[in-house]
Amino acid sequence: MNPLLEIIHITLLSISRALFNFSFILVIWILYILIKKYKSVNIYNFDNSKTVINALVESILQGIIIGIIGSLIIAVIGLPINLTYYLIFLLPLALILSLINIRYLCFSYAASVMGVLSLIFRGQIIFGITLPNININISGLLALVGILHLMEGILIFFVGADDPIPIIAKKDGKIVLGHLMQKYWPLPIAMLVLSKGGISGSEIVQMPDWWPLLKDIPKDVITYFYGLVPFVGALGYSSITYCEEPKKRSKKTAVRLMIYSILLIILSIYSVGSLFLQIVGTILMAGIHEGMILYEQYIESKKEPIYTIPKKGVRIMGITPEGAASQMGMQIGDIITKINGINVLNTRQFRAILKNSFTFLWIEVLHINGDMETYEFKAYPDGITDLKVRLMPENPRIIYRHESVQKIGLFHIIKNKLRK
């Protein structure tokens, strides 16, 4: 069989074993809780066609597909990691960190902590006590995290802005509309590992002479094997934006994340045999990731929000698919200023105008870029009383604090659940 086809075959077998792993079921259960919590933020009944189960199934399918792609990249270019018992603590460590903050449900933080422990605990004897020898291949760990975040960047680029939930918040004394974006994906992956002995269920495939790309073979190993081992992880994306449209924000985040992942992969290759670069990589793995999040928060604090309560007209915060507004081409953030020549002052007047059941509408709309546009809609013979839009409320009943949505941990969610 062709080596590439053989790799695909072995990769799919390995991932199929990961799907029936208890860890995969545990991750799905945790993601169900997180998605349910995310949906509960939708207090203004933003028209969202996806139920919690639909969103979970979609995330699982996306996670499996990206897991296959990531596994093939790992196997084909050869980014192995030494097989060690301590690797099983990577996922539990990520889950423990998520108790503090949801955004820590990320392998960049867990792997960075694991890398630091590996650098500290090397089997030394201190005061007669033998410390454990964690002995994790940090170069391989950098490569693994780099690949995982490359996959995460791809997911965020294409689906990160799907299903954003509008939230009303107060910023600099103004009531503003923002968008909360949260995505979680279970990740079954076939991890390429280096072993002193044969790996159960593995097959022999003849690879090119340059393979593997990451060459870090322990000196005490004479006979070694590379194999694909099923591994379960989780990817997550969380962001709140007031000063940018959700799609623009998610794509910018995705590009930065992919650059970060490529940097980690390059660093992993050059860090082989270099303790200095391994230490640098371990610090940058979590440091740059956290820096990207803090940078987005800084941008939010400096830029003006784009969705505020207009002095004249009503602002659209949600559009029902296939509704009149959707058919006309209106967008979230648009301000409806006139209906059939009548000035729209507020939401109450907006509804009063539509109660006339006009059979023909011409609606003047102000876009967020400052352009005016007039839309027309025919509703013969019954007329139309509802454009199927959700409007930004002038007097919102609940105003979120940015911190209350962003800085939340899994422990906080579970504690509130137990109280109920």
Image (cartoon, grey):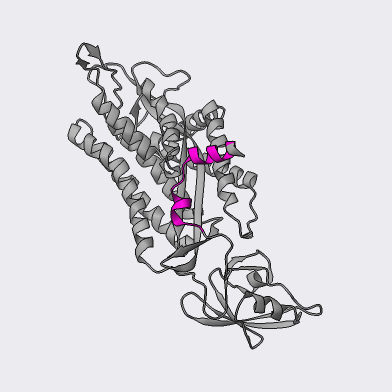
Q: How many marks?
A: 0
Q: Quadrant of residue 217?
A: top left
Quadrant of the image containing the C terminus: top right
Q: Within the magenta stretch, is there residue 412?
A: yes
Left or right: residue 34 compared with residue 115 = right
Which sits in the foreground, 108 or 201?
Answer: 108
Q: Is residue 252 above or below residue 58?
A: below
Left or right: residue 417 compared with residue 407 = right
Identify the residue shown where x is 26% and y is 23%.
121
Q: Quadrant of residue 125?
A: top left
Judged from this view, the residue extending furthest toward the top is: 128
**Which region is colored magenta?**
400-418
Q: Within the magenta stretch, is there residue 98?
A: no
Which sits in the foreground, 61 or 245?
Answer: 245
Residue 215 appears at what percent x and percent y? 27, 30
Residue 77 visible in the picture: no
Residue 415 visible in the picture: yes
Which sits in the foreground, 162 or 127?
Answer: 127
Judged from this view, the residue extending furthest toward the bottom is: 341
Q: Is residue 79 above or below residue 338?
A: above
Identify the residue shown where x is 75% and y is 82%.
358
Identify the residue shown where x is 35% and y is 34%.
111
Residue 408 appears at what percent x and percent y? 46, 45
Identify the residue shown where x is 42% and y is 23%.
204
Which sits in the foreground, 241 or 41?
Answer: 41
Q: Quadrant of residue 113?
A: top left
The main secondary structure of the magenta stretch is helix
